[in-house]
Amino acid sequence: MPPGVADTPPQDVRFCRSADGTRLAYAVHGAGPPLLLASCWLSHLEFDWQSPVWRHFLLDLGRFATVIRYDERGYGLSDWDVSDHGLDARIADLEAIADAAGLERFALLGMSQGGPVAISYATRHPTRLTRLVLYGTHPGQLCRDPESVELEQTFQQMIKVGFGRKDSTFRRVFTSLMIPGATEEQAGWLDDLQPMATCTENAVRSRAARVQVDVADLLPGVSVPTLVVHARGDRMVDFARGRELAARIPGARLVMLDSDNHITLADEQAWPVFVAELAAFMAGDRIAARTSDSMLRSLTDRELDVLHLVGRGADNQQVAQQLSLSVRTVERHLTSVYAKLGLTGRAARAAAVARLLTHD
């Protein structure tokens, strides 16, 4: 696993385990209702904050939402020593992140290769989601015709041969498809991200697994409010795929961005359009978040002290020692917290901490 970047980004990084034991890294930043990102296959929770390609996403979305994002299995700060990159494993990862972050109900943003995972989650757990956003994505990319098969084989061979080379010539092919309108600084950064985000073996295996995915049959079963956003000239995922999503998901609305970039850049006219559309779409969640804030304000100072320590990873014994209380008193304070926040069940502890992070 590569080392983290020296500069500390304004986020809280945590770890959890997926159903198969894979360790996953996730990060929380921003303020407002929760927005969980099932993002693209290239990410590094710390390195992305230095990025001229991704930093504006993190900053602007964090102004109106509490953003929870994670490195996929095999990528970034998550475990690299994995062999299963299949759809079911990735869905289980998303489920684990949502539970670990204590998210009762939340908006889900499926970006690029994260789209099929987000669509699958939406049909499996509709009551957990307030709304679904699908950005630059598709229901799957099964290669059926000979030309598509040959093209995909070429891509996979390029990854195998050129992904880890110091010379970025091979990686620049993928960069050029994702951000054809990039400056040299932006393109160079995405070139550099690829080998930092994962190793060649994971890149090959995950690419091979992704082209076996097709969740198109699930689209009519998506029941949550859905916003589909797609760039008109996207070279990585053709605009027709986004149009297909909007047409087949009941009640979905399509927003077309005037861009050729798969990743909308900060200086494009399309960027403020995307931000405004997403903020407006999440307006109802912001109203609900304000209700949650008023419930947090009902907690006593001692209850907040207990909850803050729990949020830092302390167990009940450690909380009791630090506050000079008995363990039973700590348990009573937590029971009161759960009652005031309307939380029950095994996830109450994580959910209470998530409320506190959102409020802070």
Image: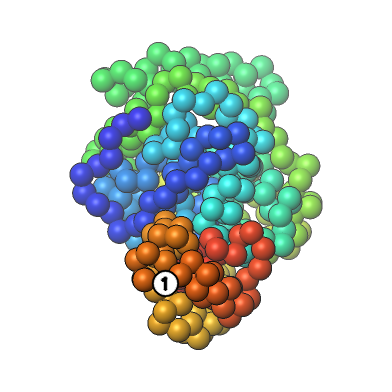
Query: Is 281 positioned to the left or the right of 6 in the image?
Result: right
Residue for point 45% across, 19% down:
201
Question: Where's the C terminus, which quadrant?
Answer: bottom left
Look at the image and name its color scheme.
Answer: rainbow
Circle 1 packing at 10 Å, graded few (<14), some (14-19), many (20+), is some
| Residue on which the image places disc 1 | 325
Residue for point 71% across, 40% down:
215
| Residue 358 in view (yes/no) | no
Query: Is 310 positioned to the left or the right of 216 in the image?
Result: left
User: Quarter-wise, where is residue 137 in the image?
Assistant: top right
Query: Is 200 positioned to the left or the right of 185 in the image?
Result: right
Residue 70 location (% of width, % of height): 46, 46
Residue 254 location (% of width, % of height): 62, 58
Q: Please state which of residues 244 and 204 is positioned toward the viewer in this rendering.
A: 204
Is residue 183 depicted above or below 85 in this figure? below
Q: Secondary structure at mark 1?
A: loop
Q: Which amino acid lies under the numbered mark 1 shown in the image of this protein?
A: Leu
Q: Please state which of residues 50 and 187 is positioned toward the viewer in this rendering.
A: 50
| Residue 316 in view (yes/no) | yes
Query: Most extreme residue toward the left, as rendered?
Result: 6
Residue 23 location (% of width, % of height): 48, 38
Question: Where's the N terminus, which quadrant?
Answer: top left
Residue for point 50% across, 73% down:
329
User: Quarter-wise, where is residue 152 in the image?
Assistant: top right
Residue 282 location (% of width, % of height): 55, 70
Q: Please state which of residues 182 and 15 is positioned toward the viewer in this rendering.
A: 15
Query: Is 15 positioned to the left or the right of 136 in the image?
Result: left
Q: Please state which of residues 127 and 279 is positioned toward the viewer in this rendering.
A: 127
Residue for point 62% across, 22% down:
148
Question: How many numbered callouts?
Answer: 1
User: Quarter-wise, where is residue 211 in the image?
Assistant: top right
